[in-house]
Image: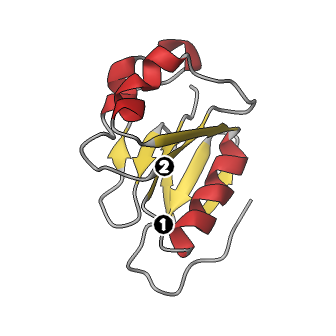
Amino acid sequence: MKLHQDSSGALNTVTGYGADYVEINLVRHSSSILVLPDAPVIAWPVSSFEQLSAEHFAMLVDSAPEVVVFGSGERLRFPHPRLTAALTAKRIGVETMDFKAACRTYNILMAEGRKVAAALLIEA
């Protein structure tokens, strides 16, 4: 699906996505990524839901978002609470949804000026 590009250009915006990719500001990524509105896109070294570990989610602690939108892949799957414990301990919310919903939700929250991060799982 193609989405329109935000005219600001200063913030990371999801501009398109499909089953095996996501575009951030028209740049295609075909592996899992972490996205924050005003920081470089970060490669997220996980290629399947089963590989997720606490360290993967802990990568977001230092950026201190209000909420992390976790795109769990093609279908909705919830990570075990021990995996997101580092975020919870810092009072960072975690919202889990399928990949497509996570992309749309990230864009909405980012456009509202919220301090949001997206953890987008693209399974190989």
What residue is at 41 percent from the left and 45 percent from the top?
34
Q: Position of residue 68 (x, y in %)?
A: 49, 45
- CA gap, disc 2 and disc 1: 9 Å
State which tag comes first along the sequence, 2 or 1: 2
| Left or right: residue 16 compared with residue 88 | right
* Image mark count: 2
| Residue receiving disc 2 | 67
> Quarter-wise, where is residue 97 in the image?
top right
Residue 114 disc label: 1
In the image as oriented, which residue stretches furthest toward the bottom? 7
What residue is at 55 percent from the left and 20 percent from the top?
48
Callout 2 crowding tier (Cα within 10 Å): few <14, some 14–19, many ≥20: many
Position of 49 relative to 114 (above/below): above
Position of 111 relative to 51 (above/below): below
Amino acid tagged 2: Val
Residue situated in front as seen by the camera: 75 or 20: 75
- SS at mark 1 in the image: loop
What residue is at 73 percent from the left and 30 percent from the top?
76
Q: Position of residue 20 (x, y in %)?
A: 63, 39
Amino acid tagged 1: Arg
The answer to whether mark 2 and mark 1 are in CB contact below 8 A is yes
